[in-house]
Image: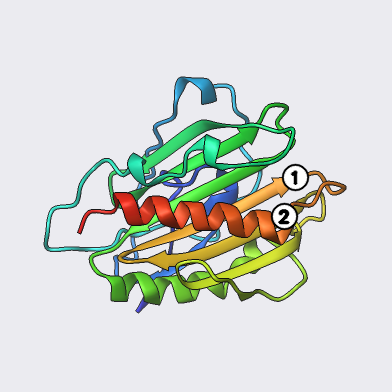
């Protein structure tokens, strides 16, 4: 069993690139190819870097090329006095799935979603377990705890690894898909766990509704 990461092409920002998943793909990294919406053309790239490159899950059956319907809608992200916009979507031809970046109106809060679709639920559950053990790539300090989201949900809330931001991360599996959701905000504006879980449950519902059998 080889170690790989969700590719940069699927990552909604450089923050999401570092997530570790366990797969049976090639050791050779795939070349990430990102496609972004026009509204994201001026979005700055985070300075976070990946620890290694990605390899795609293999499958004998053809995979759909467009999984954008799996992403949560901006209107599902509910914060009193705040609104979010989907500013970037990302895909990688080598990795079935989709990434999305959501920002609030002044850019002080960011939510990144990365969804990867595997050949079957067993592969998704296996890789989700690995993801849950590597959330220290996104949040420093407190241990991750179980989350009532999807299958094998795990959540962690705390400072970012460099201490410059408040952060949170949530992973879960839903059927043959895995999801990683990361959150960033100002150090004085931590997003509460209940909000993180609410976003996660709505993302889980979107995957259930849109994931092909």
Q: Name the residue at the front extreme.
A: 80
- Quadrant where the N terminus sits is bottom left
| Residue 29 visible in image | no
**Which residue is at a point 50% across and 69% down the rendered structure image?**
131
Q: Position of residue 204 (x, y in %)?
A: 44, 57
Q: Residues within 10 Å of mark 2 (few under 14, many from 20)?
A: many
**Which residue is at a point 22% across and 54% down the rendered structure image?**
212
Residue 27 lies in quadrant: bottom left
Say what secondary structure mark 1 lies in: strand
**Which residue is at a point 52% across and 21% down the rendered structure image?**
39
Q: Are marks 2 and 1 in contact (CB under 8 Å)?
A: yes
Give how far apart the Cα atoms at labels 2 and 1 are: 7 Å
Q: Residues within 10 Å of mark 1 (few under 14, many from 20)?
A: many
**Which residue is at a point 79% across and 52% down the rendered structure image?**
190
Q: Name the residue at the bottom extreme.
A: 1
- Quadrant where the C terminus sits is bottom left
Q: Earlier in the sequence, mark 2 or mark 1?
A: 2
Q: Is residue 147 left or right of residue 53?
A: right
Count up the numbered dots. Answer: 2
Q: Which residue is mark 1?
A: 185
Foreground residue, 197 or 34? 197
Q: Which residue is mark 2?
A: 167
Q: How is the image coloured?
A: rainbow
């Amino acid at each position: 069993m080889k170690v790989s990461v969700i590719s940069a092409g699927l990552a909604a920002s450089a923050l999401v690139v570092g997530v570790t998943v366990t797969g049976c793909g090639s050791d050779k990294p795939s070349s990430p190819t990102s496609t972004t919406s026009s509204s994201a053309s001026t979005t700055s790239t985070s300075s976070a870097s990946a620890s290694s490159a990605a390899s795609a899950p293999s499958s004998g059956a053809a995979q759909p090329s467009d999984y954008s319907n799996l992403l949560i809608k901006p209107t599902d992200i509910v914060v009193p006095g705040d609104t979010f916009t989907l500013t970037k979507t990302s895909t990688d031809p080598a990795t079935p799935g989709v990434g999305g970046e959501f920002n609030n109106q002044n850019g002080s809060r960011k939510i990144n979603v990365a969804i990867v679709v595997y050949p079957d639920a067993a592969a998704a559950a296996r890789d989700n377990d690995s993801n849950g053990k590597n959330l220290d790539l996104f949040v420093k300090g407190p241990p991750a705890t179980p989350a009532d989201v999807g299958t094998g949900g795990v959540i962690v809330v705390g400072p970012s690894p460099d201490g410059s931001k408040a952060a949170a991360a949530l992973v879960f599996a839903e059927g043959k898909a895995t999801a990683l959701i990361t959150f960033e905000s100002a150090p004085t504006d931590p997003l509460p766990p209940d909000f993180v879980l609410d976003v996660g449950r709505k993302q889980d519902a979107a995957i259930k509704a849109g994931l092909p059998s």
